Amino acid sequence: MNNQDLLLKGIMIGTHAEPWDLRVLLYKDATSVKRNEVNELIDDGYFGEIVSDRVSLVHLLHNMFTSLLVSGIAQPTIISYLRNLWDFLRWVDSNNLPCSEDTIVSSFDAWTEHLVYRVFYKKDLKHYVAYKRASTVANVIAKALSMPGNKPGHNLMLNTRLTRPSKHKSSLSTQADKQNLAYTFEFGRILTAICQKLDLVTVRGPVPIRLSFDNNKLITIAGNLINPDLDVSAIRSSSDRTRAIKARQALPDGESLFESNKRSNILNIRIGAELLIFLAQTGMNLAQADSLKLEDFRWQSNGEDYDVFRVYKGRRQGEAIFSCYNTYREHLQTYLKWLNDTGLKELDDRLFPFINRGIIPARCSQRTLGSIRILFKKNDLKFIKPSELRNTRVNWLIRHTDNLNLTADQMGHSPEVLVRDYLRPHHQRATSEIINFHNSYIPSIESPGPGVCIGQSRPQKITSAPDEAPIPDCISPEGCIFCTHHRDIMSPDYCWKLASHLRLKTLDLRAW
C-alpha cells in the first residue's frame, strides 16, 4: 500500500468539504494546515519527505477507520474521532515528539499531561472537554494497535493523570428552578411569536423585519442586509441609494423566494423556531427530528396526546413516528401549510428544510441552528440548546407526574438512563419524598394533645418521668405529655401553652 491509498472512502461530505485523507499524517506539521490546502502543499513538496517511522502506524489507523465505516458506526462519530486525532497529532508535531507504532502511547501520555496543565493550572479548558478529547484519542489508538482487554481505550486512560470528572449532581434550589423554568417559558413564547409573525406576507415583505413582543422587546431580523439600521436618505450617491432602497423593498409578486437567496436567512429563522418547538413538544433529539421527512401524517388520539403516524400509499396502516400534546396539532398544521405556501415543500422533502447559501453540508452533518442562534445573540436573548430543552422537559414531567416509569416511556428511555443522564436532584422533590416515606413507615393517629401519636393508642410512660407525673393516657392533653409515643410540635405557641398549663396547674394545686 502506498501513501496514495490512505483516502477514507464512504464518508459523506458537503459541496465545500474535503475528503479525509490519512496521508496527511505521514508528513510532519501537515495537520496544522487547513485540509482544503494541505494536499496541494504536499504535492508541491512543502513538507518534504514522509516520516518513515509513521508509515506502519498510519496504515493501522486507516485499516481501523475503514473497519468502523464498514461496521456501520455513525459517520458524525467517525468524523469526531478524526478531528480529535488531527488535534492530537498537531500538538505532537508542534512539540517535536515521536509518532510511531512504538512511541504513540508515550506521546499520548505527554499530551494528557498538557491537558491536565490546561485544566487545573492554566484553567482555559473544561475538565469534561479535556477528558472527552483524551478518551476519544485513547480509543482510536487502542483500536488501531489492537490492545487487549474489553475496554482498551479505558485502560489506556487509567495510565494517565487525567481522570473522569465527577458525575455528582448538585441540588437545585427553589429559586434556581423557578428561574430555569421562567427562562424556558420566555424562550417558548418568543419562538411561538416568531412562528406566528413570520408568515408568507411578512417573509416576502420589506426588510428589515421588526417583531415586537408583550414585554416591549423588539427583535430585528435583517435578512441579507449588512446594516439594517442604515439611514437610506443619508446616502449621497444616487446609485448607492437606489440599490439600498431596492434591497429593502418587498419581493415582486412574480419573484421566487429562492432565486437570489434574499430571504433564505429569514426562512431559516422560522424553520429553526419551528424545530425547537417541535423538540420541546415531542421530546425527540435534534438528529432524529432533523432527519424527518415531510409526508402526509395521520393523527390518532391517545388520551391527552396525539400519536402521529406516517401514512403509506395504498393502505391505511402506518408507522408511529412521534407523539405530541394535542394543543400542538394546530400549530404544526399551520407550519405545514406555510411550507406549502412558500414552496419549500417542492424544494426539499424534509420536515425542516433549512436553506444553505452556497455551501451544502453533508446529510450526516450535525444541525447547528446557526440562524436563530445568531438572532438571539444579537438581540441579547437567552438561547436554550436542544439538549437543555429535553432535560428541562424530563425533569418537569418527573416532578409533575411523580412517575419515573411513565416519564421514561414517554421520553423513549429506560428509567436507568433517565436517572443517570437527565434527572436533576431538587430539594422540593426530595422533601416530598421524605414526607411520603415517613407517612408510609411511621403510622400516626390523632392525639388529644398537640402533635401526633405513633403508638396506636397504647400509651407508655417515659423512663425519665418523675413519680408524681400523671400516667399517660389517650383521653386528655395532659395524658400525652409524658408518653413515649407522643411527638410534640415545638413551636413558640406550643411552648407558651405548656408553660401556661404548668402555671395554671400550680395555682390549682395551691388552691387545695
Image (cartoon, helix red, strand yellow):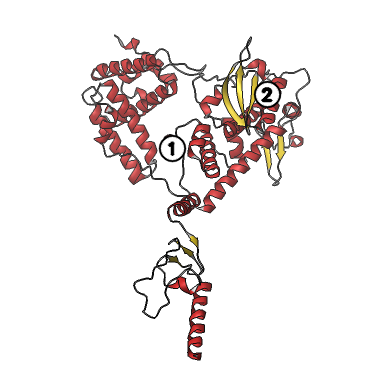
Place residue 340 in its image quadrant. Answer: top right
Coordinates of residue 66 in the picture (x, y in percent): 35, 15
Density class for disc 1 (Cα within 10 Å; few <14, some 14-19, many ≥20) is few
Query: Is 397 placed left or right of 231 in the picture?
Result: left
Residues 283 and 349: in front is: 283
Which mark, residue 194? none
Left or right position of 378 against 492: right
Give the residue at x 43% y 56%: 442
> In this figure, which residue is indicated by the disc labeled 2?
336
**Along the line of sight, the residue nearer the viewer: 37 or 217:** 217
Q: Position of residue 25 (x, y in %)?
A: 32, 20
* As drawn, 264 above or below 433: above
User: Seen from this angle, which residue lies furthest left?
Assistant: 102
**Splitting the image into 4 quarters, where does residue 211 fall?**
top right
Q: Mark 1 — residue?
A: 421
Q: Residue at x 68, y 30 (%)?
A: 331
Residue 115 shows up from this direction: yes
Q: Secondary structure at mark 1?
A: helix
Q: Is residue 307 left or right of residue 509?
A: right
| Residue 512 rendering spot, x and y as whole percentages | 49, 90
**Amino acid type of disc 1?**
Asp
Identified by mark 2, the residue type is Leu
Between 50 and 383, the one nearer to me in the picture: 383
**Position above or below: 13 against 185:** above
Task: Using the rendered image of the protein, determine whether residue 352 is visible from the camera's viewpoint.
Answer: no
- Kindly indicate whether the residue at mark 2 contacts the one at mark 1 (C-beta within 8 angstroms): no
Instruction: Determine the residue located farthest toward the bottom in the rendered image.
Output: 511
Point out the tag, 1 or 2, that comes first from the N-terminus: 2
* Residue 350 pos. (x, y %): 60, 19
Q: Secondary structure at mark 2?
A: helix
